[in-house]
Amino acid sequence: MVHPVTVPSRRDTARLLFATARALADGGVVADDFLKPVRPHVPAHVLDALRPHLALPDRRTGIRTIPGLLDDFTGMEPTPERWGLPQTGLTRALDVALTIVAFALGEPFAWAGQQAGRLVHDIVPTQGLEDKQVGASSLTALEWHTEDSFHPERAQVLMLYCVRNPDGVGSRVSSIRGTGLSGERLDLLRRPDVVILPDDSYPSTWQEDGADGSPADAVRTVWDADDGLCVRYDPPYSRFLTADPAFHDAYRELGEALERSSVTVGVGTGDILLIDNDLAVHGRAPFRPRYDGTDRWLKRLQLRLPRPRPASEDRESGYGQRPLRVGVPADPPA
Ligand SMILES: [Fe+2]
């Protein structure tokens, strides 16, 4: 006799996730422990319960919103003034819960040179960075970009979790697959004619000509995956290797098309937003920070998936920035 498989409801799964993460955090586990060679144990039934409620970003829009899995994390502490401040037990449990969700989707990883190698980043408006092109900015628009566009081992998927967003500041996303650029323009943008340097969230110890003295990496703005167009784009940190006016026209047209076909995704407390970092770029509208503990507060994790990129990227230096990686879990969702 075949017994039907029962999928726990989203509500029951949220309760299970909260209880699991809380027990781990109460036992002294922090999210970064998941990067260690011997990782905290997450029971298989917790990952099994999560997976039916998760899906990777849509391969046309590059977006997926996942509500309701962290509904038990209520009464969070005030928004910190900057990343890296001591956190309450509840916030440490939230970071553990988000890491568990990330493992159910792919392979979360960190950057040795960003937020001290932490797996879970805090994205909060920070005094002194209001006008920078980094996630901690506020008064300036965060321009369209591929996350960590300068690096060949950048995330395939960005995972953002909204702790609070009282003013409803939307995350902006735009997919290369909605731009409708002509084949001629796309061919120009497939040329390796751009250099992209590390952004201001990394310490400025890198060398433009590569960590080993080799020439700077030449990057293709548009590349092709098996199922369609992908993009690698970060104008504020880019310089060009060609003076060809046709290329510059195509690059400018790409920016205009991304702006035209963009969407603003509203994220509220408890929402997870997944962005496909290969086919979509993201940004953020400006907003006025309050610095009183009530500001917008996002958590960010970065995920690797077993998806190929152009072989030419294998030769890039990544300007000495090093990903901190763990093992790949079995059976990520399709
Ligand atoms: Fe970003």
Image: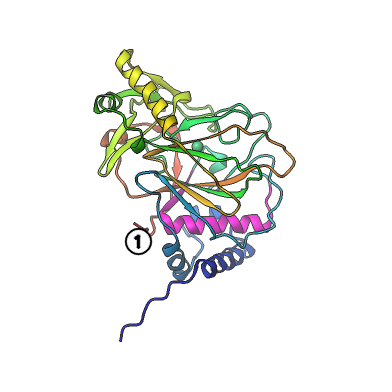
Identify which residue is drawn at 52% across, 37% down: 113
Identify which residue is drawn at 53% across, 70% down: 12
Toward the right, the furthest residue is 292
Q: Identify the image quadrant of the N terminus.
A: bottom left
Vertical placement of 195 versus 327: above or below?
Answer: above
Q: Is residue 308 left or right of residue 292?
A: left
Does 128 lie within the magenta span? no
Dividing the picture into quarters, in which one does residue 75 lie? bottom right
Give the camera-side residue of 310 and 143: 143
Identify which residue is drawn at 48% across, 24% down: 236
For label 1, count other residues whose C-alpha is less than 10 Å away and answer few (under 14), some (14-19) or many (20+).
few
Determine whether the residue tagged by mark 1 lies in a helix, strand or loop.
Answer: loop
Identify which residue is drawn at 37% across, 32% down: 232
Q: Is residue 176 left or right of residue 297?
A: left
Vertical placement of 207 versus 293: above or below?
Answer: above
Image position, residue 212 (x, y; %): 39, 27
Magenta residues? 86-110
Q: Is residue 110 left or right of residue 286?
A: left
Q: Is residue 70 left or right of residue 55?
A: right
Query: How many labels were placed on the picture?
Result: 1
Q: Is residue 170 visible?
A: yes
Residue that carries the numbered disc 1 in the rendered image: 331
Image position, residue 219 (x, y; %): 34, 28
Give the camera-side residue of 290 and 317: 290
Image position, residue 168 (x, y; %): 61, 43
Q: Is residue 207 visible?
A: no
